[in-house]
Amino acid sequence: MKQLFIIRHAKSSLNTLTDFDRSLHKRGQLEAAEMAQKLITEKIAIDAFVSSTAVRAMSTATYFLEAFQQKGKLLYNQIIEVPELYEAELDTFFQVTEQIDDTIQSAALFSHNPGITEFAYKCSNFKKEVVPMPTCGVVGIRVDADFWKDFSEATKHFLFFYYPTKK
């Protein structure tokens, strides 16, 4: 049994020239801190954080990593950077997920719309619940598989959909 937490990056600012380099807006910083704490409060265990290398996704993942480091129960104590998750299409999300190390039982994957929402749809029977996936929204999925390579074909169960309160 595996668990995947699909997380859209927090609210970004528009203060840079390139989309890739956009940093988190102040509201995004609050969203990331809030949602990391929400998962900790709900006693969600995460072994590893996998992220797009875009600044806003890495920054969001860093908020989660730091919160979970304080909890002290991480298998991987760093963010696994996956450049392919920037502007990823649906197939890429499945490919990246299937390459996660099997020692990891639960992983959080950070990326961008529209791909992250489409991926959440495909992994969830509650499509209407995640339309559209808001910034720093988190979809929890339980996967009936012992190996990540079986992710695409495995039965997936919707666990929850959390999103930040409006600030």
Image (cartoon, grey):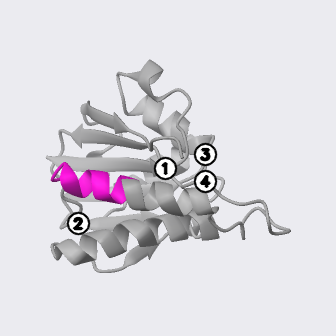
Can you give x and y, in whole percent of width and height, for residue 101 in the image?
27, 67
Can you give x and y, in whole percent of width and height, for residue 159 in the image?
24, 34
Q: Is residue 100 magenta?
A: no
Q: Which mark is residue 96?
A: none
Q: Which mark is residue 89?
A: 3
Mark 2 vs 3, N-terminal side: 2
Q: Which mark is residue 47?
A: 2
Give how far apart the Cα atoms at labels 4 and 1 are. 7 Å
- Amino acid carrying mark 2 in the image: Asp
Extreme residue in the top direction: 128
Residue that numbered label 1 is attached to = 136
Residue at horizontal 29 percent and vertical 67 percent from the top: 48
Question: CB under 8 Å between callouts 1 and 2?
Answer: no
Give how far apart the Cα atoms at labels 3 and 1 are. 19 Å
Give how far apart the Cα atoms at labels 1 and 2 are. 19 Å
Give how far apart the Cα atoms at labels 2 and 3 are. 25 Å
Residue that numbered label 4 is attached to = 11
Region in magenta? 35-44
- The crowding category of the residue bearing disc 1, from other C-alpha atoms within 10 Å (few below 14, some 14 to 19, many at least 20), is many
Mark 3 vs 4, N-terminal side: 4
Quarter of the rendering containing residue 45: bottom left
- Amino acid carrying mark 1 in the image: Cys
- Amino acid carrying mark 3 in the image: Glu
Question: CB under 8 Å between callouts 4 and 2?
Answer: no
Q: Nearer the viewer, mark 3 or mark 4?
A: 4
Q: Is residue 42 magenta?
A: yes
Question: CB under 8 Å between callouts 4 and 1?
Answer: yes
Confirm whether residue 115 shows in the render: yes
Q: Secondary structure at mark 2?
A: loop
